[in-house]
Image: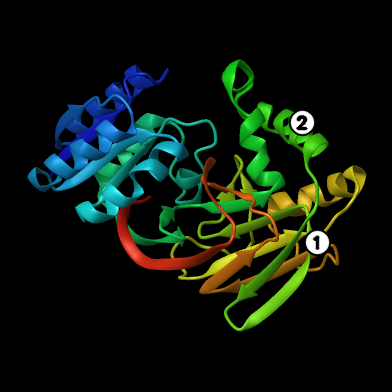
Amino acid sequence: MRCLVLINPNSGRAAEAEDAVRSLEAAGLDTEIERPEGEVAARKVIERRANEFDALVVAGGDGTFHGLAESLVAAGKPLGILPLGTANDLARALHIPDDLERAAQVIAAGKRQRIDLGRAGRTLFFNVATIGLGAEVPRFHSGERKRRLGLLSYPVSLWLAWQQNRSFRARIRCDRETARGRFIHIAVGNGPNFGGGLVVDEDCRIDDETLYLYAIKPVGFWRMLRLAPWIRAGQLRPWPEVLTLRGKRITIATPMRRRINLDGEIAGHTPCTFTVEAKVLEVFVP
């Protein structure tokens, strides 16, 4: 199997990724490494060279995969994942280990699974879209603190975003069901994981052709802390402070435009319609 491998040369784990590629070669795969500078260059490499190979391997985090989603789907090649990010929620959803040598073994073993992607308006996403509190966290989750603390920086970023977040009114239509209310946070999941391991719904799978929504009504910070373990587990249906829905098509409208966070990147505003692109990408899985 011939694999085109894309590695971000600016990643702090780029050398580790190249070691993992040598493991692929030791397992009998024929690999060629490209080191594009940025997502635009990476998309051009995929569009220009994908047809020369049997599979694509990308070393990156959730933001990288989000930025390459359209190109990866269009290429029509199986995707191998070498997780380089802080959260690695896509890898987590697929049970791909963070350890790059073990992730390379998953690719070499050759087992594949077709997965869904979500679409927010015109933009594809792998994991979860958030509006409100979740969309504000990335403004604080960057820079030196993120590099120094890794996943531990998420609670700090959440607290800083909480201090500035305000509730908002929203109209939510999920298939034929409509709900209206005031919320502080809305999440729409194609895959189960976001924010470094939070779960949008305990039943959510990245290949079940369904979107899962939860929306948190205005609550105090201490009540939010009480909800936190259940948010992390995706077990929110029993809580009266939380609206939960699931379906194939979800439309969210707000009186004022609200930012939408897709896979950790700000990418669009309300109003927005979310749909499922079923089984559009094949990936290597354990």
In this rendering, would 36 be left or right of 184?
Answer: left
Q: Quadrant of residue 186?
A: bottom right
Q: Quadrant of residue 30?
A: top left
Please name the residue shown 57% across and 79% down the image.
Answer: 175
Q: Which residue is mark 2?
A: 160
In this rendering, would 281 be left or right of 56?
Answer: right
Q: CA distance from mark 2 to mark 1?
A: 21 Å
The outermost residue toward the bottom is 176
In this rendering, would 17 be left or right of 97?
Answer: left
Q: Residues within 10 Å of mark 1 (few under 14, many from 20)?
A: some
Q: Does residue 77 appear anywhere in the picture?
A: no
Please name the residue shown 28% across and 55% down the image.
Answer: 73
Q: Amino acid at mark 1?
A: Arg
In this rendering, would 201 be left or right of 44?
Answer: right
Closer to the camera, 70 or 76?
70
Query: Can you give x and y, in whole percent of width and height, for residue 113 in the image?
Result: 33, 59
The mark that comes first in sequence, 2 or 1, is: 2
Is label 2 or label 1 in front?
A: 1
Provide the secondary structure element on which disc 2 rests.
helix
Rendered view: 147 above or below 110: above
Provide the secondary structure element on which disc 1 rests.
strand
Q: Quadrant of residue 21?
A: top left
Q: Which residue is mark 1?
A: 182
Query: Can you give x and y, in whole percent of width and height, for residue 272 in the image?
Result: 54, 62
Query: Can you give x and y, in whole percent of width and height, for residue 221 in the image?
Result: 88, 43
